Amino acid sequence: MKTDAIVLSKIGLASSAFLFKEISLPELKQDELLIKSEAFGLNYADVMARRGRYKEAPPLPCVIGYELVGKIIEVGNKEDQHLIGQRVLAFTRFGAYAKLVITKLNAIIPLPNAKAEIAMALSTQAVTAYYMSDYISTIRKNDIVLIHAAAGGVGSILIQLAKLAGATVIAKVSSTEKENLAKNLGADYTINYVEKDYEKEIELLLKGKRLDISFNAVGGSTIKKDMRLLGSGSRLFLFGGAELLKGRWGIFSTLNFLQKMGFILPIALMMRSKSILGINMLKIADNKPLVIEECMKAVMALYESGQLIPQVGGIYKAVHIAEAHDYLESGRSSGKITVFWP
């Protein structure tokens, strides 16, 4: 079985990293189905993979991508043939940058009417946000919550979930436009970290109080700052390493990134009653697919009830994949970026 795909052919700039070519797909297994893609979403992990900083990515050349919207055209077993023709939102373990995509039967959710760009914002990023905020460790009423990259795909959903829980939200962003977006989504305070030291600003805001939760997609030097800001019973969710991409010196940049994060002893966490939770949704999808399914359904229900407003950050055609990647990597984007096939 053949299909057209956007193939990550080498590490580096988006303008030279991708090739449009035909690839071969394997035969469907009993627990799999085949989807004709309408559109797929971009995630920051895609940028990390293109830059050679995401060790989970397949060996080059490969097709990356975690989610898509499309119609089911083939099913691997006889019992589920009724699914053929259904339009769905689907998760994949890579492979979403293709016109035909294979995924698992339990990695889909019906999507009869919603626009693809809305569905994209409710997939990987929203599921990640919900997993952290409502599944693995619930946000409580009156918690004080810091959200890094608060205008991004995960951050914009986290603001809304935190406010639904009754928390006070501090949104860390990089521009005035993103401050306005965060406020419109319900953030109580915004901090432009480009203009001000966010640690000092939060200390002024809290007036002796401490943070209860930090959702951190940045890593590096921000970890030590967050740990100083967090109080007893607090949690730091680490679900990204955006600061790593700022380095230009290969292994030395990686070592510097790790050094900035510091070395934390488990006994110190116990004595201070603080927790650090590492989040890698690819591992959850690999080992606990039913958790992903539960989170997907919960997020969709919140959207359908009007409690969650997805943020569309950009719409691109497949031929402009390099521009879409550059925009996401630039830090100027907010919300979710979706790429459509012709």
Image (spheres, rainbow, N blue to C red):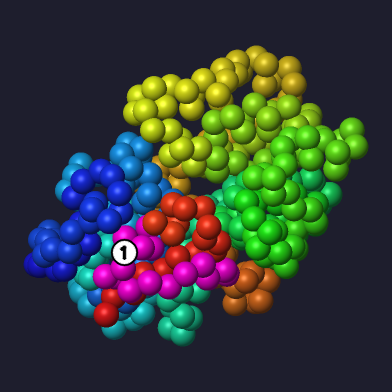
Q: Quadrant of residue 302?
A: bottom right
Question: Seen from this angle, which residue lies furthest front?
Answer: 195
Give yes or no for residue 318 being in the magenta stretch.
yes
Q: Can you say whether 233 is above or below 170 in the image? A: above
- Most foreground residue, 109 or 223: 223
* Residue appearing at x 33%, y 42% in the figure: 51
Q: Amino acid at mark 1?
A: Ile
In depth, the one of 227 and 306 nearer the eye is 227
Extreme right residue here? 207
Q: Can you identify the residue that label 1 sits on?
A: 321
Q: Is residue 145 magenta?
A: no
Q: Which residues are magenta?
A: 310-325
> In the image, is 186 to the left or to the right of 292?
right
Residue 262 in which image quadrant: top right
**Dividing the image into 4 quarters, which one contains the C terminus?**
bottom left
Horizontal side, residue 307 vs residue 100: left or right: right
